[in-house]
Amino acid sequence: MAAEDYTFGPYKIHHTEVFYSTNLSYAMVNLRPLLPVKRFVDLTADETSDLWLTAQKVGKQLESYHKASSLTLAIQDGPQAGQMVPHVHIHLIPRKSGDFEKNDEIYDAIDEKEKELKQKLDLDKERKDRSLEDMSQEADEYRKLFL
Protein backbone atom coordinates (compact mmCIF):
# COMPACT_ATOMS: atom_id res chain seq x y z
CA MET A 1 0.00 0.00 0.00
CA ALA A 2 1.43 3.37 -1.02
CA ALA A 3 2.12 5.99 1.64
CA GLU A 4 0.63 8.80 -0.44
CA ASP A 5 -2.72 10.48 -0.15
CA TYR A 6 -5.76 9.62 -2.29
CA THR A 7 -8.53 11.71 -3.80
CA PHE A 8 -12.27 11.28 -3.60
CA GLY A 9 -13.89 13.77 -5.97
CA PRO A 10 -12.65 17.15 -4.72
CA TYR A 11 -11.51 15.74 -1.35
CA LYS A 12 -8.10 14.61 -0.19
CA ILE A 13 -8.04 11.30 1.66
CA HIS A 14 -5.11 10.71 4.00
CA HIS A 15 -3.37 7.41 3.27
CA THR A 16 -3.96 6.21 6.84
CA GLU A 17 -7.73 6.15 6.15
CA VAL A 18 -7.24 3.54 3.40
CA PHE A 19 -7.20 -0.04 4.63
CA TYR A 20 -7.19 -2.02 1.37
CA SER A 21 -6.09 -1.20 -2.17
CA THR A 22 -5.46 -2.72 -5.57
CA ASN A 23 -3.99 -1.05 -8.65
CA LEU A 24 -7.46 0.18 -9.63
CA SER A 25 -9.48 0.40 -6.39
CA TYR A 26 -9.20 1.28 -2.75
CA ALA A 27 -11.32 0.88 0.36
CA MET A 28 -11.36 3.44 3.13
CA VAL A 29 -13.18 4.13 6.34
CA ASN A 30 -16.22 6.37 6.21
CA LEU A 31 -17.71 6.23 2.66
CA ARG A 32 -15.30 3.58 1.24
CA PRO A 33 -15.02 4.92 -2.34
CA LEU A 34 -13.30 2.74 -4.85
CA LEU A 35 -12.44 4.40 -8.18
CA PRO A 36 -11.77 8.01 -9.25
CA VAL A 37 -14.35 7.97 -12.06
CA LYS A 38 -17.48 10.11 -12.04
CA ARG A 39 -20.00 7.49 -13.16
CA PHE A 40 -20.30 3.72 -12.92
CA VAL A 41 -21.30 3.58 -16.59
CA ASP A 42 -17.90 5.11 -17.50
CA LEU A 43 -15.82 2.30 -15.99
CA THR A 44 -13.80 -0.02 -18.20
CA ALA A 45 -14.40 -3.76 -17.99
CA ASP A 46 -11.21 -4.18 -15.91
CA GLU A 47 -12.25 -1.39 -13.53
CA THR A 48 -15.75 -2.84 -13.14
CA SER A 49 -14.38 -6.29 -12.40
CA ASP A 50 -11.81 -4.94 -9.94
CA LEU A 51 -14.43 -2.75 -8.21
CA TRP A 52 -16.78 -5.68 -7.57
CA LEU A 53 -14.01 -8.11 -6.61
CA THR A 54 -12.72 -5.51 -4.13
CA ALA A 55 -16.24 -4.93 -2.78
CA GLN A 56 -16.68 -8.69 -2.38
CA LYS A 57 -13.38 -9.13 -0.53
CA VAL A 58 -13.87 -6.06 1.70
CA GLY A 59 -17.53 -6.89 2.32
CA LYS A 60 -16.72 -10.43 3.45
CA GLN A 61 -14.17 -9.15 5.97
CA LEU A 62 -16.37 -6.31 7.29
CA GLU A 63 -19.35 -8.62 7.66
CA SER A 64 -17.26 -10.99 9.75
CA TYR A 65 -15.59 -8.20 11.76
CA HIS A 66 -18.95 -6.63 12.67
CA LYS A 67 -20.54 -10.04 13.35
CA ALA A 68 -23.17 -9.31 10.74
CA SER A 69 -25.10 -11.84 8.67
CA SER A 70 -25.59 -9.85 5.46
CA LEU A 71 -24.46 -6.84 3.45
CA THR A 72 -26.22 -4.00 1.70
CA LEU A 73 -24.20 -2.73 -1.26
CA ALA A 74 -25.40 0.54 -2.78
CA ILE A 75 -24.21 2.66 -5.69
CA GLN A 76 -25.80 6.01 -6.43
CA ASP A 77 -24.76 6.64 -10.04
CA GLY A 78 -25.36 10.27 -10.96
CA PRO A 79 -26.99 13.22 -9.22
CA GLN A 80 -30.59 12.11 -9.84
CA ALA A 81 -29.73 8.81 -8.15
CA GLY A 82 -28.52 10.64 -5.03
CA GLN A 83 -24.79 10.72 -5.80
CA MET A 84 -23.38 13.63 -3.75
CA VAL A 85 -19.71 13.31 -4.70
CA PRO A 86 -18.99 12.93 -8.45
CA HIS A 87 -16.94 9.78 -7.90
CA VAL A 88 -17.83 6.10 -8.28
CA HIS A 89 -18.15 4.43 -4.91
CA ILE A 90 -19.98 1.56 -3.29
CA HIS A 91 -21.46 1.84 0.17
CA LEU A 92 -20.79 -1.46 2.00
CA ILE A 93 -23.08 -1.72 5.00
CA PRO A 94 -22.87 -4.79 7.27
CA ARG A 95 -26.38 -5.85 8.28
CA LYS A 96 -27.79 -7.72 11.27
CA SER A 97 -31.21 -9.17 11.95
CA GLY A 98 -33.52 -6.45 13.25
CA ASP A 99 -31.27 -3.49 12.42
CA PHE A 100 -34.29 -1.95 10.65
CA GLU A 101 -37.94 -2.75 11.27
CA LYS A 102 -38.50 -3.18 7.53
CA ASN A 103 -35.45 -4.35 5.59
CA ASP A 104 -35.74 -1.76 2.80
CA GLU A 105 -35.72 1.13 5.31
CA ILE A 106 -31.94 1.05 4.86
CA TYR A 107 -32.42 2.98 1.61
CA ASP A 108 -34.39 5.72 3.37
CA ALA A 109 -31.62 5.92 5.97
CA ILE A 110 -28.97 6.19 3.23
CA ASP A 111 -30.99 8.94 1.53
CA GLU A 112 -31.36 10.84 4.80
CA LYS A 113 -27.63 10.64 5.54
CA GLU A 114 -26.83 11.80 2.00
CA LYS A 115 -29.14 14.82 2.46
CA GLU A 116 -27.45 15.66 5.78
CA LEU A 117 -24.05 15.30 4.14
CA LYS A 118 -25.03 17.56 1.24
CA GLN A 119 -26.04 20.27 3.69
CA LYS A 120 -22.65 20.00 5.46
CA LEU A 121 -20.45 19.81 2.38
CA ASP A 122 -18.53 22.79 1.12
CA LEU A 123 -16.88 21.55 -2.05
CA ASP A 124 -14.00 24.03 -1.62
CA LYS A 125 -12.92 22.47 1.67
CA GLU A 126 -11.89 18.99 2.78
CA ARG A 127 -14.63 17.02 4.49
CA LYS A 128 -13.74 16.18 8.08
CA ASP A 129 -16.71 14.39 9.60
CA ARG A 130 -14.43 12.62 12.09
CA SER A 131 -10.88 13.30 13.19
CA LEU A 132 -8.05 11.80 11.18
CA GLU A 133 -6.94 9.99 14.32
CA ASP A 134 -10.35 8.32 14.72
CA MET A 135 -10.50 7.30 11.06
CA SER A 136 -6.89 6.07 11.10
CA GLN A 137 -7.59 3.90 14.14
CA GLU A 138 -10.62 2.35 12.44
CA ALA A 139 -8.62 1.78 9.24
CA ASP A 140 -5.84 0.14 11.29
CA GLU A 141 -8.37 -2.36 12.66
CA TYR A 142 -9.76 -3.12 9.19
CA ARG A 143 -6.28 -3.33 7.66
CA LYS A 144 -5.52 -6.28 9.97
CA LEU A 145 -8.30 -8.22 8.25
CA PHE A 146 -6.23 -8.39 5.05
CA LEU A 147 -2.88 -9.55 6.44
Image (tube, rainbow, N blue to C red):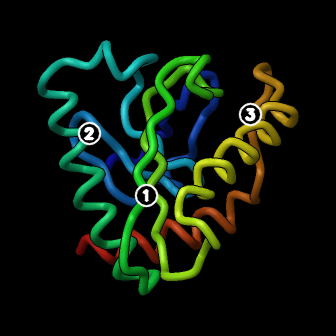
Q: In the rendered view, would you say 42 is above or below 107?
A: above
Q: Nearer the viewer, residue 4 or 87?
A: 87
Residue assigned mark 1: 72
The location of residue 58, given as percent across then percent down, is: 31, 61
Q: Is residue 24 above or below residue 78?
A: below
- State the separation of the CA atoms marked 3 and 2: 24 Å
Q: Secondary structure at mark 2?
A: helix
Residue position marked by numbered label 2 in the rendering? 51
Q: Circles 3 and 1: CB distance less than 8 Å?
A: no
Q: Residue at x 33, y 63 (%)?
A: 59
Quarter of the figure with the C terminus: bottom left
The residue type indicated by label 3 comes to Glu
Residue placed furthest toward the right: 119
Circle 1 packing at 10 Å, graded few (<14), some (14-19), many (20+), is some
On screen, residue 139 versus residue 3, left or right, reads right
Instruction: Give the total number of marks visible in the rendering.
Output: 3
Q: Position of residue 15 (x, y in %)?
A: 49, 49
Residue sticking out furthest to the top: 42
**CB within 8 Å, label 1 to label 2:** no
Residue located 25% across and 50% down the image: 54
For image coordinates 59% across by 49% down, the residue present is: 107
Residue identified by numbered label 3: 126
